[in-house]
Amino acid sequence: MDNCKVIAEGLENLTTVLPANGKQHAFCVASIPDKRNLAVCFSDGGVQMINLNDDSKGEWVAGGHAKLEHAVYSPETGILALSSADKRIALLNTNDLQEKPLFIEEHSLGNSKVKSMTFDNKGTLYAITDDNRLRHWETDPNKYASALAAMNLPPLTDTEWDLIVGREFTQE
C-alpha cells in the first residue's frame, strides 16, 4: 500500500492521503456519520479520524494493541468497536477520544478472532468469531459496571476492578 487513499463519498475532488511510511498500513474504515468523520484503522493499532466536512486529518488515537481488522460504530452510544489481530475488541468513546478505551479481552472471545461485528439499536455489540459462535456484550460502561456489581462477587480491589472494566469506575 504505497499510496493509501480515502475518497470521501459526496465530497467532490477531496482526497485524504494516509500515512504510507512502510510501518503502518490502513486495514479498515468505519463511518461516524453523526460527527461527519471516518475512523481509519491501521496495522499498528492506531486510528486516524478524518473530518468529512473539509477532508482534514483529525485526532490520532490508540485503538488497540495489534493490527486492527474490523471497525463498527454505534450512533446510539457513540462507541466505536475495533477488533484486532490479538483477539481483543477495543471500545472507543467517540464523544471523548481522550478517554481510555474499554477492552473485551481474548478470554471473553473464547480465544477466537472476530470475523464480523455489528451493533443493534440499543448499543449491544454482536460479533461472530472464527469458532462459529455469535457473541454479544453490553457496551454502555455504566450498565456493564452495574451488571458486575449485581453478580455479588467478593469485593474487588481497585486494580482488579480496573482490569475487568478497562478503566476506573466508582464502586457503589
Image (cartoon, helix red, strand yellow):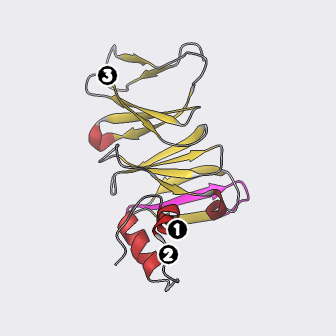
Determine contact: label 3, label 1, CB under 8 Å. Answer: no
Question: Please, what secondary structure does the residue beneath circle 1 have?
Answer: helix
Is residue 123 one of those drawn in magenta? yes
Q: Is residue 98 above or below residue 125?
A: above
Looking at the rendered image, the quarter that the C terminus falls into is: bottom left
Instruction: Please give the name of the residue rendered at 28% of the width and 40% of the height, measured from the top-left corner.
Output: 35
Can you identify the residue that label 3 sits on? Answer: 56
Can you identify the residue that label 1 sits on? Answer: 160
Q: Where is residue 105 in the image (x, y as percent from the top left)?
A: 59, 58
In the figure, is residue 108 to the left or right of 171? right
Can you identify the residue that label 2 sits on? Answer: 156
Determine contact: label 2, label 1, CB under 8 Å. Answer: yes
Q: Position of residue 20 (x, y in %)?
A: 54, 16
Q: Which of marks 3 and 1 is in front?
A: 1
Magenta highlight range:
121-133
Find the distance from the CA under tag 2 to the CA under tag 3: 44 Å
Is residue 156 one of those drawn in magenta? no
Identity of the amino acid at label 3?
A: Ser
Q: Is residue 15 above or below residue 49?
A: above
Looking at the rendered image, the quarter that the N terminus falls into is: top right
Identity of the amino acid at label 2?
A: Leu
Q: In which quarter of the image is residue 140?
A: bottom left
Question: How packed is label 3: few (under 14 Cα within 10 Å), some, or many (20 or more)?
Answer: some
Q: Where is residue 60 in the image (x, y as percent from the top left)?
A: 40, 32
Find the distance from the CA under tag 2 to the CA under tag 1: 6 Å
Question: Please, what secondary structure does the residue beneath circle 3 have?
Answer: strand
Q: In this view, does 65 lie above or below 50?
A: below
Which residue is the extreme one toward the bottom?
152
Q: In this view, does 72 lie above or below 102?
A: above
